[in-house]
Image (cartoon, helix red, strand yellow):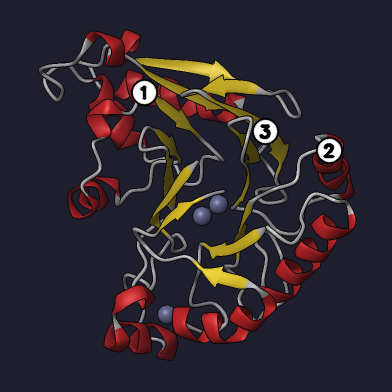
Amino acid sequence: MKLQYIGTGAAEGFPGMFCRCEACERARKKGGHNLKTRSCAMINDRILIDLSPDLYAQSLLLGLELGKVKDLVVTHTHKDHLDSFFLELRAKEGAVKQIHKEESYLSVYGSSFVQSVIHKALAEEPNARASRLKYVPVETGTWFQAGGLSFCPLKANHKKDELCYIYAVTDGVTNLLYANDTGTPSAETLELIESLGLVFHAVSMDCARGTLPGDGHMGIRENLELKLHLEQMGCAGEGTRYYLNHLSHMSGIIHDDLQTLMGPEGFTVAYDGMIVNIK
Ligand SMILES: [Zn+2]
Ligand SMILES: [Zn+2]
Ligand SMILES: [Zn+2]
């Protein structure tokens, strides 16, 4: 399974769009992997996880063929993860002049909150063709197929007024846990993860809180705890690789600092464009 991190920053980006704090200024100065656009990812070059507001520029920079994407799996409706303007453009007649038959619609998987965003996007664009967006409801703990892979939605601990998901993903051989945005998963979610009976080859975790205590996002402490939990449950082992994603300026540390802190603990800090061949 090929996972590509498209963007690896929090909602405001890193450096924060309008922020002049010390961490943002250091990130600007150091550049490279310290510069992080808003989070989304691609699996096997054809399945998108989330739609960041930076996706158009990201696609040009990384050479992503968005016209070929047929499946969009959504974690939640925060605007850094689901840009409804993109949905309008996908559905708008004039914005997509030519479309191959097999890509005639984009399947969008997520909770009913995602469905509301789709409805709104279609309502706001008079030239939108509803047939170009197909909402597919998903349920906690129930596997569904997208782009030749199986996904299992697991309740995130993130936005209190919305059912947000993290996902277990498998191609039958390799297994991925994609976990952002979320704070420490609840006991219920951990039990569900254990019940899947999978050993993850790759685990991608939210680390927006950095050195601060976790809340609706994890920080270093929660990342280490979750790693331990997964190992204790038999869901991770020697071959498991850990990645940190969705970084923010909140705790004042930048990508390079986090890599220095977490590298020795077995974590790799993801960067924009990073490709992970999961095996
Ligand atoms: Zn986010
Ligand atoms: Zn800042
Ligand atoms: Zn969020």
Q: What is the distance, in whole Å, between disc 1 and disc 2 at their CAs?
A: 28 Å
Q: Nearer the viewer, residue 279 or 265?
A: 279
Side (left or right) of 232 relative to 1 = right
Q: Secondary structure at mark 1?
A: loop
Q: Quadrant of residue 250?
A: bottom right
Which of the two discs, 3 and 2, labels the residue nearer the N terminus? 3
Residue type highlighted by circle 2: Leu
* Residue 103 horizontal/vertical position (percent): 29, 16
Q: What is the distance, in whole Å, between disc 3 and disc 2 at their CAs?
A: 10 Å
On screen, residue 97 above or below 214: above
On screen, residue 105 above or below 202: above
Q: Quadrant of residue 85?
A: top left
Query: What is the number of the mark on residue 153?
Result: 3
Q: Which residue is mark 2?
A: 192
Q: Which residue is mark 1?
A: 70
Residue type highlighted by circle 3: Pro
Q: Residues within 10 Å of mark 1 (few under 14, many from 20)?
A: some
* Residue 64 horizontal/vertical position (percent): 25, 43
Side (left or right) of 1 relative to 57 = right
